């Protein structure tokens, strides 16, 4: 039986340099196959928060549980949790000297200990899934930004994670490239992947999210369904935020 919640964050607190309080008692539970979109102004702690889920950012107080495993400072514990989480960043972080196919197969071969043949078969399936199988033998520098971001998504999926985290995956793309990445994310959401997405893409949040979270000044201000959040936000801070982006 799958646990009801794949992510549980309880009273998460984080400071930078012991004086900047970036996360202030943040609580969030994400159900299996749920899509949660986190929105908020720059500097609100959104990206820092989701980066605590796989220990890319340490936190000082509270508790985070991923798929029943409580995150600790133990490296084996962190490694076990990272095997369950795929992450896509603003920057693509692809290896420029490796082909697209090699970028996608690298981690499964080294971390999951798959054979090269097995890794390549799955990588090609994923590249087809994200719509760029014809780019498999090219190098990242030969691809558009949108194509590179879709390679990054395929690379994260190649580890067969239970959870996908997206940290503003379209923010560094030209406007005409945004749609192809969002379409890939929509497809992933409809396939039943558990997803937490930090994004300012309102259309994506309206269409795909099960819940929208607004963060500001290191706190969660409001959590609601997209219909409730965009048409009838309860908090004054949410109303102000939406008046600036809609």
Image: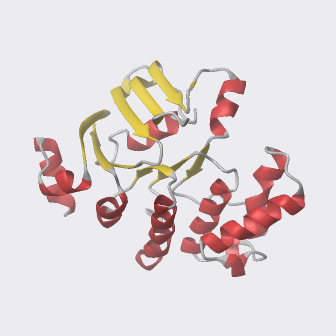
State whether residue 194 appears in this view: yes
Q: Which of 214 and 121 lies nearest the eye of the viewer?
A: 121
Residue drawn at (74%, 64%) of the image:
123
Q: Is residue 235 left or right of residue 130?
A: left
Q: Is residue 201 left or right of residue 164?
A: left
Q: Considering only vertical position in the picture, is 246 above or below 11?
A: below
Q: Quadrant of the N terminus?
A: top right
Asked whether, in this view, residue 116 is left or right of residue 15, the answer is: right
Q: Residue at x 72, y 26 (%)?
A: 76
Asked if residue 161 is positioned above or below residue 116 in the image, the reply reads above
Q: Position of residue 215 (x, y in %)?
A: 29, 41
Q: Count the marks: how many?
A: 0
Q: Position of residue 241 (x, y in %)?
A: 19, 51
Residue at the front extreme, as displayed: 1
Quarter-of-image position of residue 122: bottom right
Q: Position of residue 12 (x, y in %)?
A: 40, 25
Residue drawn at 11 percent across, 52 percent down: 232
- Picture quarter containing residue 148? bottom right
Q: Quadrant of the C terminus?
A: bottom left
Instruction: Indicate the colouring scheme.
Output: secondary structure
Q: Is residue 141 above or below residue 215?
A: below
Q: In this orientation, which residue lies closer to the viewer: 19 or 182?
A: 182
Q: Nearer the viewer, residue 51 or 130?
A: 130
| Residue in view at x 75 percent, y 77 percent | 138
Give the image location of residue 201, x and y in percent.
34, 62
Q: Is residue 88 left or right of residue 167?
A: right
Q: From this viewpoint, is residue 39 visible?
A: no
Instruction: Examine the image and state in which quarter residue 106 appears.
Output: bottom right
């Amino acid at each position: 039986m799958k646990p009801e919640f794949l992510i549980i964050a309880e009273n998460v607190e984080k400071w930078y340099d012991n004086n900047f309080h970036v996360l202030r008692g943040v609580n969030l539970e994400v159900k299996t196959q749920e899509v949660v979109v986190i929105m908020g102004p720059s500097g609100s702690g959104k990206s820092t928060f989701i980066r605590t889920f796989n220990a890319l950012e340490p936190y000082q107080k509270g508790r985070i549980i991923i798929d029943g495993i409580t995150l600790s400072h133990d490296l084996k514990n962190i490694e076990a949790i990272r095997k369950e989480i795929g992450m896509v960043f603003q920057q693509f972080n692809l290896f420029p000297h490796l082909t697209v196919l090699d970028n996608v197969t690298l981690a499964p071969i080294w971390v999951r200990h798959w054979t090269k043949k097995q890794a390549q078969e799955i990588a090609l399936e994923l590249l087809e899934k994200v719509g760029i199988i014809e780019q498999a033998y090219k190098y990242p520098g030969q691809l558009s930004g949108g194509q590179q971001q879709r390679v990054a998504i395929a690379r994260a999926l190649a580890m067969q994670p239970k959870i996908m985290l997206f940290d503003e995956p379209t923010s560094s793309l030209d406007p005409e490239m945004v749609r192809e990445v969002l379409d890939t994310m929509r497809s992933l959401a409809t396939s039943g992947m558990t997803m937490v997405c930090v994004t300012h893409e309102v259309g994506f949040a309206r269409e795909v999210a099960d819940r929208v979270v607004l963060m500001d000044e290191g706190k969660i201000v409001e959590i609601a369904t997209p219909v409730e959040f965009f048409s009838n936000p309860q908090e004054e801070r949410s109303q102000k935020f939406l008046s600036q982006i809609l």
